[in-house]
Image (cartoon, rainbow, N blue to C red):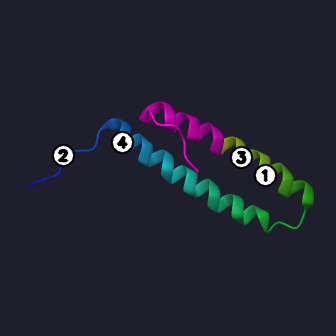
Amino acid sequence: MTRPAPTASARFAAIIDHEIDRIMDQALADRRDQRTATRHTMAAYHTGQLVALAALRAKITGKEPTT
């Protein structure tokens, strides 16, 4: 028996989840940077990306983002 193909929303949500994981990995790598200004700038940048992706995922799936 074959599984039904995932819906477009489920596929898009999976792509967003992958991007969130990638951004989190990059944020952890950027934390190792010893320059304080760079760390703070990148932290704000990554936070903005994560918030935008979480909002987009919530709109697509119809579910509130969870932490």
Earlier-in-chain disc, 4 versus 2: 2
Disc ID at residue 10: 4
Instruction: Evaluate if marks 1 and 4 touch, with contact meaning CB atoms under 8 Å apart.
Output: no
Q: Quadrant of the N terminus?
A: bottom left
Helix, strand or loop under label 3? helix
Helix, strand or loop under label 4? helix
Query: Distance from label 4 to label 3 (Cα)?
Result: 24 Å
Query: Distance from label 4 to label 2 (Cα)?
Result: 12 Å
Disc ID at residue 42: 1
How crowded pointer 1 is (Cα within 10 Å; few <14, some 14-19, many 20+) is rated as: some
Earlier-in-chain disc, 4 versus 3: 4
Earlier-in-chain disc, 3 versus 1: 1
Residue 67 location in percent, x, y? 59, 51
The residue that appears at 29% across and 38% down in the rendered structure is 7
Residue 51 location in percent, x, y? 65, 40
The residue that appears at 37% across and 36% down in the rendered structure is 9
Disc ID at residue 47: 3
Residue at which label 2 appears: 4
Residue 38 location in percent, x, y? 86, 55
Image vertical order of residue 61 relative to residue 3, above or below: above
Query: Distance from label 3 to label 2 (Cα)?
Result: 35 Å
Check disc 1 and give the amino acid type: Met
Query: Distance from label 2 to label 1 (Cα)?
Result: 40 Å
Secondary structure mostly taken by the magenta-highlighted segment of the chain: helix
- Span of residues in magenta: 50-67
Check disc 4 and give the amino acid type: Ala
Earlier-in-chain disc, 1 versus 4: 4
Picture quarter containing residue 31? bottom right
Picture quarter containing residue 49? top right
The residue that appears at 58% across and 57% down in the rendered structure is 22
